[in-house]
Image (cartoon, coloured by chain):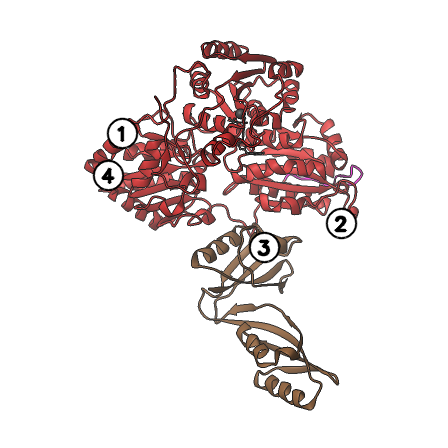
Amino acid sequence: MQHIISLLMENESGALSRVAGLFSARGYNIESLTVAATEDASLSRMTIVTSGSNEIIEQINKQLNKLIDVVKLVDITANGEHIERELMLIKVQADNSEKREEVKRQADIFHGRILDVTDTTYIIELTGEGSKLDAFIAAIDASDILETVRSGATGITRGETCLRL
Amino acid sequence: MELSGDDIVTQFLKDEGVEYVFGYPGGAVLHIYDALFRQDAVKHILVRHEQGATHAADGYARSTGKPGVVLVTSGPGATNAVTGIATAYLDSIPLVVLTGQVTSAFIGSDAFQEVDSVGITRPCVKHNFLVKDVKDLAITLKKAFYVATTGRPGPVVVDIPKDITDPNIKIPYEYPESIELRSYHPVVEVKSSQVEKAVDALLSAKRPMIYSGGGAVLSNSSNELRTFVRQLGYPITQTLMGLGAYPEPDPLNVGMLGMHGTYEANLAMHECDVLLAVGARFDDRVTGEIKQFCPNATVIHIDIDPSSVSKNVHVDIPIIGDVKQVLIELSNAITASKRKPDTKALKTWWKQINEWSSKDCLRYDRNSALIKPQFVLEKLYEVTGGDAFITSDVGQHQMFTAQFYKFDEPRRWINSGGLGTMGFGLPAAIGTQLGNPDATVACVTGEASIQMCIQELATAFQYSTPIKVINLNNRYMGMVRQWQEFFYESRYSHSYVEALPDFVKLAEAYGHVGMLIEKPEDVEGALKEAFAMKDRLVFMDFITDQKENVYPMIAAGKGHHEMHERELA
Ligand SMILES: Cc1ncc(C[n+]2csc(CCOP(=O)(O)OP(=O)(O)O)c2C)c(N)n1
Ligand SMILES: [Mg+2]
């Protein structure tokens, strides 16, 4: 099953490679990984989307916790309700009015925003859960997709439970 | 006090109480070497290869319980140290390895002797650091010692660019007495609810088994383990890494378990209904085929490292904590409990175990005209009175030593169990001897292994470490040959050790005493003679039976009940 793991780590050089190295060395799946500094400049927050059996997910959590630079960790998926968001920018072929209509219509349905328009292309911005972005891609004619870029998922637990020091 | 980075390194080591640094100089650490020259509090041991430095520091650490310290230069110095770092990592040995690095400004430019030491060592260290500012040097060194020696111990690398140790840049220095890391909390409180569950399971057992590993040694829990096991009267088996924490011989000790463990230990594992693992990690050489491992047992596991729990084998009752602390709490809870072990069931269980033991699974041909390796080890045990530190290399000789030398104290059996590093034995013996100057130290090795770090004979001469090298010379990479005999229809592909040196002359060339022993009747006398030479390294070349095998053996992928046994006429 897919899990989203969020963690706070010391904002040290090499911190990212410790996590990436752990996943490759132990043969764990890594579907996406995002990292950026937090409001506290000494900490980075990382979101990892991974999948595996319960035993493997348990090991992943333990192994991540064992990294000396990891300050705190939460398996968002295993911790009740949460919000998951991913950003996608997608460039599609829009070189005739029929296609322009159709892409615009789909973008509206998915609450996307058209960020850039040329005679032949549109760039659409979309945020949502990964599955929503997948659905948008499926809704567009595959041969019209010129380029996609996805941020990888980030997530946060609902309510008062927080991942903080 | 105002100090430059090079002096901070040596002053810090002194303040930290470091006795020895095992090292080898080179460009990136020359400032530090100059600082070493200016002081005499910290003694430097010059090895002949950086791998030797790491193994020597490792032997020092294993035998004394104190962290081993290594100093090597950048590039090839660091890469040569990697094997020893990985060796320490897999056996959770506290090492602090200082690697020189090119000057900060050159990092990333493929400068002379530049490698990414932090990157290369990352997967085989507990943690590593690159020092970026001389102001961080002392605190980083403190962190390194703290991380290496607390929790589940392990090697820590500190990569120090040359400019950080510039003798011309002085900053205020104060020894950091203590340190806290917000991301690292090695002390965990033992959950009493888990202790209760464990006691309940232990006292309900009909066929209990205690399986103890390296964690019992590392946590200095030998006394607590002895008290606990004797309190219950339950059988105990130990892993290759655990030998000595519980003494041998002892009526409750059924010997080592695993691939070359005893018949009784492995069968008792297979048949037990409650298994208590004490600081052991369910390594594949111990468990055999996981699907067949302890099929009927409720598993209790004491470990300081949560990631060890349920990694390979599902654990029913985990107890996270320091082994020593947990054993004390278990003992107290058992004493306080109204329940007692089920003596009737225990009697039946011991009867069964004793029946298995009566098979005498370690028997071998005592009438052989050739020297049997087992015979040498039995005599080594007798001649040393069981009172020696024994290091080993990797192969049959290692397994024979584990089977035949009876360790009755922890930290006496020094071997590379996790990584299985040939070349470990001799340098580890040097570190062991330095850490225990008055003790008897022997290195049991094979003619293949010894050649991997043979150059350390020079180090041993320079520092007058009177080690006794027991070379069980079977002219084969015996362990490889054994697998080829069993699993490759005796096709001995490249496992014959050809063009062997004359070890006696070689030892003599290094300034030591060499002895050649070719007949069983000479073994005991030769050992007595060698061990009587208290101040000399004696290299004993025993020409042993070429085709001897280690029994019992569980083939990889088989269960504990599927042992190969020796057939004797
Ligand atoms: C560095 C290294 N290379 C290869 C091996 C694989 N290996 C394990 S045992 C062994 C043979 C050891 O031969 P020897 O030292 O003569 O010991 P024996 O088994 O004959 O007692 C080899 C090659 C290893 N463990 N370590
Ligand atoms: Mg050999």
Instruction: Look at the image and give the colour of chain B.
Output: red
Residue B444 appearing in the image: yes
Comes first in the chain, label 1 or label 4: 4
Expressed as whole percent of the image width and height from the top left, the position of residue A152 reads 59, 67
The alpha-carbon separation of the residues under discs 3 and 2 comes to: 22 Å
- Residue toward you, B445 or B20: B445
Single out the residue that lies furthest toward the left: B344
Compare residues B42 and B313 and report the one nearer the observer.
B313
Chain A's colour is brown
- Label 1 is placed on what type of residue? Asn
Q: Using the image, determine if residue B391 lies above or below residue B489.
A: above
Mark in front: 1 vs 3: 1
Indicate which quadrant contains ligand 1. top right
Do marks 1 and 4 share a subunit?
Answer: yes
Image quadrant occupied by the N terminus of chain B: top right
Distance from mark 4 CB to nearest ligand 1 atom below 8 Å = no
Q: Which mark is residue B354?
A: 1
The answer to whether residue B200 is left or right of residue B43 is left
Q: Position of residue A78 (x, y in %)?
A: 45, 64
